[in-house]
Structure formats: C-alpha cells, structure tokens
C-alpha cells in the first residue's frame, strides 16, 4: 500500500475543540492526526496498545504516568500499553498518534 499525504496541509484547528483525522488504519496500527485548540484538554485515560506521540507544532503539557512532558515541535513520546496519560494544549497544538 502506498500512502503519501502532506500532514501539514491536514492541520486545522476549531475555535475551542479537538479535531482528529485518521491517516492510516491497518490491522495492527492506527495513525491519527490530532489538532487541539489552545486551552483544550484530554482527561486522564489509558490505551490497551503501545503508542507513539510525535508533536508537529504548538505547545502543551503531556502527563504520562505522573511525569510532566513539554509538548513542543519534534518531541516524540513513547507510551506502554495501559499507561495513564492526559494532555493540555497551551497553544494550538497538533500531533500524530501511532497506536500499535
């Protein structure tokens, strides 16, 4: 399968919400673009799969199992399955989430 997409052209922010766009869905992998408007939050939750978060733009805080991680462009965060995490966008923030 050939997949070529310009992720930067897919980034769009709503005024006060969170947008997610599926980029790729395979049997063992999901790739999703998240665009969080300034001030939005994702409350504490877990995932049954391992995950990678790659920050594309913006600024936010990612809390992973009690550890505070600055979300700035280029940061890559690895999560084990069932890891408790939450996040808050301090500015408009976009990132790719890869679940495997």
Image: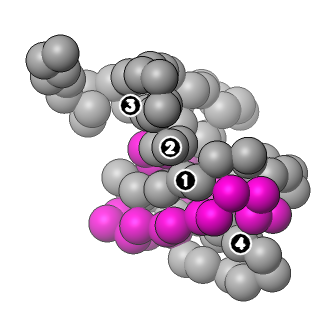
Magenta span of residues: 71-97
Answer above or below: position of 91 versus 30: below
Give the side of residue 50 with respect to residue 40, left or right: left
Given this view, does label 4 or label 1 mark the residue nearer the observer?
A: 1
Q: Position of residue 95 (x, y in %)?
A: 45, 47
Say which mark, if any, is on residue 100. 2
Is 57 or 21 nearer to us in this picture?
Answer: 21
Circle 2: is it few (<14), some (14-19), or many (20+) Cα within 10 Å?
some
Check whether the beta carbons of the residues at disc 2 and disc 1 lie within 8 A of each other: yes
Q: Which residue is mark 4?
A: 64
**Could you tell me if residue 40 is visible in this image?**
no
Element type at mark 4:
strand
Q: Which residue is mark 3?
A: 11
In terms of sequence position, does the residue under pointer 3 or pointer 1 come before the other?
A: 3
Give the side of residue 78 with respect to residue 18, left or right: left
Circle 3: is it few (<14), some (14-19), or many (20+) Cα within 10 Å?
some
In terms of sequence position, does the residue under pointer 2 or pointer 4 come before the other?
A: 4
How far is mark 3 from mark 1, CA to CA? 20 Å
In terms of sequence position, does the residue under pointer 2 or pointer 1 come before the other?
A: 1
Q: Is residue 95 magenta?
A: yes
Q: Which residue is mark 1?
A: 51
How far is mark 2 from mark 1, CA to CA? 6 Å
Give the side of residue 32 with respect to residue 85, left or right: left
Q: Position of residue 36 (x, y in %)?
A: 60, 41
**Could you tell me if residue 72 is visible in this image?**
yes
């Amino acid at each position: 399968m050939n997949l070529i997409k310009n992720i930067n052209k897919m980034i769009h922010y709503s005024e006060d919400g969170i947008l997610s766009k599926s980029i790729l869905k395979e049997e063992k992998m999901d790739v999703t673009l998240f665009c969080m408007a300034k001030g939005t939050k994702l409350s504490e939750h877990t995932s049954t799969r391992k995950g990678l978060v790659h920050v594309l733009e913006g600024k936010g805080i990612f809390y992973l199992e009690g550890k505070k991680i600055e979300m700035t462009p280029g940061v890559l965060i690895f999560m084990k399955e069932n890891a408790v995490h939450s996040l808050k966008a301090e500015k408009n923030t976009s990132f790719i989430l890869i679940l495997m």
